[in-house]
Image: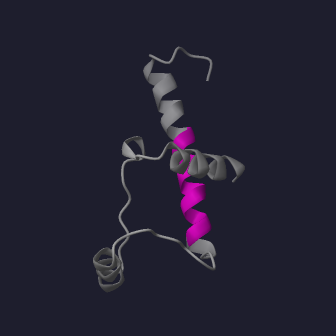
Amino acid sequence: MTDSPRTPEWQQAYREQWQKIIDAFIRTFQEDSPPILYHYSRTESLQSILKSNIIRASNIRKLNDQLEYDYGFNLAKKL
């Protein structure tokens, strides 16, 4: 990726690399579920998650704790 960050080629390469990281990260949860998955929420939210069998994710840029992003990013890089 030697092109300028403003070129469409660079942007496409950037998106492709991020997609590979995201896909690898998701595969780790699809292949072998972690023995424990922590999710902090109110009781009502937990009940809703369990009933719907759906966990929604937030936009990572809008998290109020930068360490959440750092942890996830570093974990993805290790993959």
Magenta segment: 17-29
| Residue 61 location, quadrant | top left
Say above or below: 33 vs 58.
Answer: below
| Residue 17 location, quadrant | top right
* Residue 45: percent from left, percent from top: 31, 74
* Residue 8: percent from left, percent from top: 43, 22
Residue for point 33% across, 79% down:
43
**Front position in the image: 56 or 16:** 56
User: Residue 22 magenta-drawn?
Assistant: yes
Residue for point 44% across, 68% down:
40
* Residue 55: percent from left, percent from top: 38, 70
Q: In which quadrant will I find the N terminus? A: top right
| Residue 48 location, quadrant | bottom left
Query: Would residue 25 appear left or right of 41 to someone viewing this image?
Result: right
Kindly give the residue lying farthest to the front in the view shown.
42
Give the dominant element type of the magenta stretch: helix, strand or loop: helix
**Front position in the image: 35 or 39:** 39
Q: Which colour scheme appears in the figure? A: one colour
Query: Would residue 62 appear left or right of 33 to someone viewing this image?
Result: left
* Residue 6: percent from left, percent from top: 44, 16
